[in-house]
Amino acid sequence: MSEVRSTVAMNIRRLRAAKGLSEIAVAGAAGLSRAGYRNLEGGTGEPRSATLVRVAKALGAMPTDLLRPAAPLPRARFRSLKRMKAREQLLVDVGRRLADYQQLEAALDANDPYAFATYPEPPASGGPAAVAAAGEIRKLLGLGAKEPIRDICGLLEGAGIKFLRTGVASNDFFGLSVAAGDGGPAIVVNTWQRISVERWIFTAAHELGHLVLHREDFDPDENLESKDKEAEANLFAAHFLMPEGAFFAEWNDTAGLALFDRVLKVKRIFRVSYRTVLYRLQEHGTVDVWKKFQVQAKSRWGRTLLRDDEREALAADAFRASSPESSRAREPQNLVEADFMDDRLHRLVRTAVERDHISLSRAGEILDKSFAEMRQLAAAWV
């Protein structure tokens, strides 16, 4: 089998699986017989240009996507409680985008060192280790003990962590992280429009927790989730975003307000979900906090929390993987997209375009934008 045939065959199989399409569906949409399509996917058929154009269109891809050799999967921590059909394709896309990112850094001599490269993985696991690590990482970032995090993307980008966005239409996938030295360290956040900005921010902190706490636990072939390690990363994220002293200082300042109003005010100060605030209160033994919030939410918000959320037994060190609110529709007083802006890659792309290192079409590829979207963005630069 020739290298081109092998590459085309592998890319077609991967893209078809990611779209959840049958061979018959793709063959029909591309105007091919089933036998002809199977030969192409099996690597025995000749990948003619006109055929590749039709197959790519049937798969919602570009012809170049079928011809591009796939880079080795990055050493990522990408696990979920539900199997994702698009998992391999997403990892391939992340690998390609990180390779583009690195090329851009090299061209502009703009490599930022990873601030936590020598930070030792905690010798112990569990809640106390996660909380301690959150405090230590905040100190390394120069954050004050009571300082809220206003720009998590900029903060972590300044520490040498790459940020990428993706828009996967799924309520079960929030993000992934890539280990240092393999295109990373990097954090990928699912910024699908139905997921709240609060969830985006928490996901970034959660994946930072994995980078710090579980350094030896990055394997792209492993997709089974460890509930204990997810709980540790969630606890790290909660204390990273809301350190103990800052959280209770703000909480005590709101003592004269109703519980519902106190939660919403504190949540906006720290840019977290209302559920993250309630978990922190639960962690310190505040009794019936969920039930009381639910009663007040119904009178103020018009409806209660989900029944399963209300009934769930909440241990202090057992955040679920999906503990912060995921849906924009269920998050009162939403943050907006401007509260979560990944700036560095856009800044590097603009510099490269203005210095004629890359074309506008290449800039669009790197930022995962169409040429029309890229032209519109370039016209808006001032």
Image (cartoon, rainbow, N blue to C red):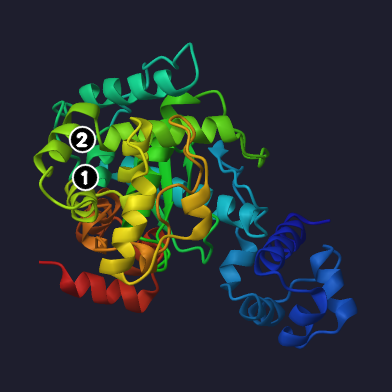
Neighbour class for label 1 at 10 Å: few (<14), some, many (≥20)? many
Left or right of 328? Residue 37 is right
Q: Nearer the viewer, residue 349 or 224?
A: 224
Q: Which mark is residue 300?
A: none
Number of marks: 2
Residue drawn at the location 19% of the way across and 49% of the way down: 262
Which quadrant: the N terminus? bottom right
Q: Quadrant of residue 220?
A: top right
Which quadrant: the C terminus? bottom left
Q: Earlier in the sequence, mark 1 or mark 2?
A: 2
Residue drawn at the location 20% of the way across and 40% of the way down: 149
In this rendering, the answer to whether 103 lies above or below 195 is: above
In this rendering, the answer to whether 275 lies above or below 294 is: above
In this rendering, the answer to whether 127 lies above or below 234 is: above
Q: Evaluate if marks 1 and 2 touch, with contact meaning CB atoms under 8 Å apart.
A: yes
Neighbour class for label 2 at 10 Å: few (<14), some, many (≥20)? many
Position of residue 14 measured from the top left corner of the image (x, y, whole percent): 70, 60
Position of residue 311 measured from the top left corner of the image (x, y, whole percent): 51, 50
Residue 69 in sight: no
Q: Which mark is residue 270?
A: 1
In this rendering, the answer to whether 126 lies above or below 57 is: above
Residue drawn at the location 29% of the way across and 63% of the way down: 332
- Separation of residues labelled 1 and 2 (CA atoms): 8 Å
Residue 367 in sight: yes
Determine which residue is flagged by label 2.
247
Q: Could you tell me the amino acid type at mark 1?
A: Phe
